Amino acid sequence: MPWSFGERVKGTIAFTDETAQKLDTACDRGFRLILTQIPTHDAYDGGSFAYSADAQGAFAKYVNAVADRWGECIVAFEIGNEINGGNQLSFPSGYDPDATVVALMKAVHDAVKPSHPAIAILGGSTNMIGTGFQKKLFDAGMLKYADGVAVHPYSRHADGLPLELAKLRETIDSYGSDAEIWATEFGHDVPDYEEAAAQALKSVTLMSAADVDVAVWYALLEEQWYPNFGLYSGGTKRPMAHTIDFAQRKLMARGRATKVDVGNDMIFAYRFGSDATVVWGAPQTLSVSGADAAYDYKGQALSDSASIAISPRPTVIMGDITMRAGASGLIADTVLQYGQGAWRYFARNAQGAYDELSYRSRWYDSLFMSDWDGTLALKADGGVPARTGSDPMRVVWRYTAPKAMQVTVMGCFAKSPDGDGIDISIARNGTVSTSDIVSGGEKRLRTDLSLAQGDHVEFIAGPNQTYGGDDFDFRGRIFLQGQAGSVSCP
């Protein structure tokens, strides 16, 4: 309910337009609403993000008026939308951005909470999970006036969520706050709707396990601007809609997900309640006892609940079960095992020295970075090297063999045609086995290696010759020889 729609004349609040009627209808039908209230109005502070005391007071009064009108069906106000993006927090001299946002949060809190204590006030709204951005707001005192922190964790793959959400939760806790985490928007923008549905179930599961209190898929209907997000296209129910529906009815109602240790770091299992287990991982046959039923990631029943073929796309098994893993030719995967398993991450300089990366928060995300160069970064499904060909700083994924074995190593690298490309290679104990240049599009590397226990396999990407345009997508996999599958770029 935008500020300018309800206060068309400065100082006069009236809810009479079509938007107000839509909210009336939604509430009459029993919907529960999170309203994103953006603090901009042409009549205040020149239409910029409200910074003066008068503008902030007027905005707080307006939000409270919205609560007075629709409070019975409003569960939360999200104050601002993705405020870590663009130039939203550009204020005149004398206004500190973080202190100004916190002052606005206080004004809204003080106006709304006394008469509407059940409505949650959400602050720090970020595109992605911007813990580095939000921490500055926390330093300025925002958590005193927020019931929750709003994030929009859009991603291609859900596998990076546990690390990012743990970082945010740890940061909130460090201020002695019990503020909740609300993913008021999330989704997977891929044209393969089956893959989007599979990632949706992983996101729901991982967010539940990571202490996210509310999560909302964006969007219900296909939109012109974001055609891949809609759960519905016209009257057609897309795969993601079946997944979200199934997760709400059959999984979330059982309580929060908890991780289950199955003794295999290539199998990922989470249990909702006592009798619903979501499992995915390296392709193999899982032997299950005690199962009542099994479903795919869209909630479609599987014919066999005792012997289940699992894959990187989740399966749901109902019942008080025990599981026994089978054998898989896939023994390591950079995306599935991001931040865990036998993987470690490094920067490597021109002299061949290594700096192990540490996990850090930034304005939009959290990822692995180096003390040696602030450009170099590594994330769940890609990275960026640094510098130039004369002084390269390469990004490295390193796998350490737990035992002697013969393996086939495969990597898929992809990037836009910006810059002169990246140099890529696969190495064993520092000796390159295969290499190439990716100047645009996708390129795959493959090599067979004989590994002893403790040997290192490294996927390496450098800047080629010139700096810039070196961001790339990447997925690496290691198979037992003779059982190699394929690798696709993320």
Image: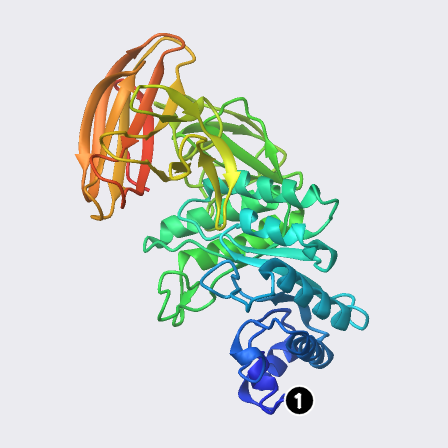
Report the quarter where the C terminus lies. Answer: top left
Q: Is residue 373 left or right of residue 409?
A: right
In the displayed structure, would residue 343 be above or below residue 444?
above
Residue drawn 22% across and 26% down? 446
In the displayed structure, would residue 459 be above or below residue 232?
above
Q: Is residue 33 left or right of residue 479?
A: right
- Tell me if mark 1 has few (under 14), some (14-19) or many (20+) residues whose alpha carbon lies within 10 angstroms of its own: few
In front of the other: 203 or 14: 14
Q: Is residue 461 left or right of residue 31?
A: left
Quadrant hosting residue 120: bottom right
Residue drawn 72% across and 75% down? 71
Tell me the SS state at disc 1.
Answer: loop
Whether residue 302 can be seen here: yes
Most extreme residue toward the right, as rendered?
114
Report the quarter where the N terminus lies. Answer: bottom right
Q: Is residue 59 left or right of residue 360?
A: right
Count numbered badges in the picture.
Answer: 1
Quadrant hosting residue 21: bottom right
Quadrant hosting residue 275: top right
- Give residue 56's position: percent from left, percent from top: 66, 74
Residue highlighted by disc 1: 11
In the displayed structure, would residue 445 be above or below residue 408?
below
Residue drawn 78% across and 66% down? 117
In front of the other: 356 or 476: 356
Whether residue 22 can be seen here: no
Residue type, label 1:
Gly
In front of the other: 441 or 298: 441
In front of the other: 434 or 236: 434
